[in-house]
Image: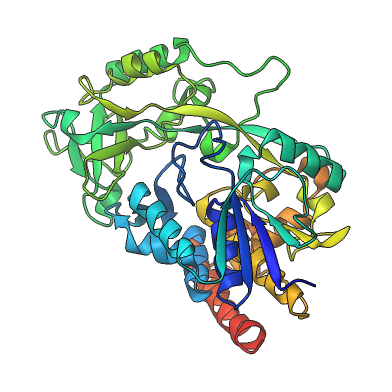
Amino acid sequence: MTKEIAVVGGGLAGSEAAWQIAQRGIKVRLYEMRPEKFTPAHRTSYLAELVCSNSFRSNSLENAAGILKQEMRMLKSIIMHCADSTKVPAGSALAVDRERFSVMVTEKLKHHPNIEIIRKEIKEIPVDGLITIIATGPLTSDALAENVKKITGSEYLYFYDAAAPIVFKDSIDFNKAFWASRYNKGGAHYINCPMNKKEYYDFYRELLSGERYGVKEFEKEIYFEGCMPIEVMAERGPDTLLFGPLKPVGIKDPKTNTQPFAVVQLRQDNKEGSLFNLVGFQTSLKWGEQKRIFRMIPGLEKAEFARYGFIHRNTFISSPKVLMPTMQVKQNKNLFFAGQITGVEGYIESAANGLVAGINAARLLIGIEPLVFPKETIIGALCSYITESDPENFQPMKSNFGILPQAEMGKLSKSEKKRILSRYALDKMACFIDKKITKN
C-alpha cells in the first residue's frame, strides 16, 4: 500500500486531520476545491475558513465546550493552537480574528513537509485507491454528494444553517450602547444595545414581517436548534427572544443602573476590534431588510454592515447507519468521514472529529488498530453519539454534558457535578494519551 493518505476538504476537520497525519510522518494529499469552485457560504480560499460566528464558545472547564478544547490541546491540535494564537477579547469565551486564524492554519499546513495542498474538486472516492478521509463539510459539492450517497447506501439528512451579520464598530452609537459582559464575567468585552419594552416589541413585529430568502420548493426547512435564524426563533412567540439571544439577565445599563427589558450583544470579530458580529442573529432576511430592521436596535441606527447574514443548506450522513466510532465506514475500513458531514455540529466539534479520523487513518496505514476514544471524554462521547444514536431520530449534536455517561452523584449542585465530570474527562484523556497514543 502507498504510504500516503488523501484528505478531501480543507475546512476545520480536514485541516486538523491532515495535520495529525503529517505529524506522524505520513505524506498527505489535502484536496480543497476553493478557489476553483466556491460554496454558497465561503468567501476566501483560505483553509479552515470560519463562515458563521468567530466564536469557539466557552473556555471554561465547567462547560463541555471548554473541556473539549482542552482535550484537543492535550492531543496537540493545530486548530486549537491557531485559535489560541489569534484570540480576541470575548469574556469567558474563545473568539478569534477570523482572517488571521484561517491564514495561520493555511500557512502551517502549506509549509509542512508532509502535506501537499491540491486545489481541485474531488468528485469520486476513494482517491486513487488511497486511504481517504472525507471532510467536505455541510456544503459538499453536488457531484461528490451523489458519489457519497452511492458508497454509503444512505439517504442524506439535511437542515438549514444561517450566519449573523457583522457591523463596523465606528458606526455604533455609544451614547446608547455600552460595554459589559453578562454578570461581569471575563471583563467588559461585549457591546450591549439595550431595548425598552416598546422598542423590543416594535422590533419583534418587524422581524416577523421582514422579507426572507426562500428555500427551494422541493426542500423542507429543518433548522439546527443551535444555529436557528432569529426570525424563525421569533415565530415561537413574542417573548421567545427574551429567553434567547436578547435575554437581559445579568446585564445592567450603566446609564440607568437597571436591567434593560431586552439587550442585543455584539462580539468582537477581528484582532483590531473594528468589526463586531450580532450575537445570536443568524438570519435568512434579505439584505435590505437586515439593514432596515437591525437599524431599529438602539445604538445601531446608523450601523454600517461589513457582512450581512445569510442562509445555506447543511448536509450530513446518517452516521449511525454508516460509521464506526473510529470514523471508519462500516463497509469500507479504508474510508473515513470527519467533521460536520458526520453530524457533529460546531467548529471545535468538527475539528475534534477530524483529529480522531486523522489519528486513526495514520494508524491504519502503518498497521496499528484504530482507536475508539473513551466515552468519558467529550471527544469520545461525540464519536459515540453520532455512531450509536437511533438512526431514525438522528440529529446533529454539539458538545454537552448530556452525552457523557451519567454517574449517580447524589445531591451535589450542578456546578459541582460539572467540575467532577470535567476532571474525570481530562484525567481519562491524559491516561488514554499516555497508554494508547504516546506509546504507539
Which percent across, then down, holds residue 299?
20, 26
Q: Position of residue 390 (x, y in %)?
A: 81, 48
* Residue 341 relative to residue 77: left or right: right
Residue plotted at (67% across, 86% down): 440
Which residue appears at 47% of the width and 27% of the height?
310
Compared to residue 72, the image places residue 403 above or below, namely above
Question: Residue at horizontal 65%, vertical 33%?
Answer: 159
Give the total of numbered labels.
0
Q: How is the image coloured?
A: rainbow
Of 430 and 298, the residue lying toward us = 430
Place of residue 167 in the rendered image (x, y in percent of width and height, measured from the top left):
28, 31
Relative to 218, 155 lies left or right: right
Residue 428, visible in the rendered structure: yes
In the shown orientation, is residue 319 left or right of residue 282? right
Q: Nearer the viewer, residue 194 or 143?
A: 143
Viewer-closest of 147 and 271: 147
Picture quarter with the N terminus = bottom right
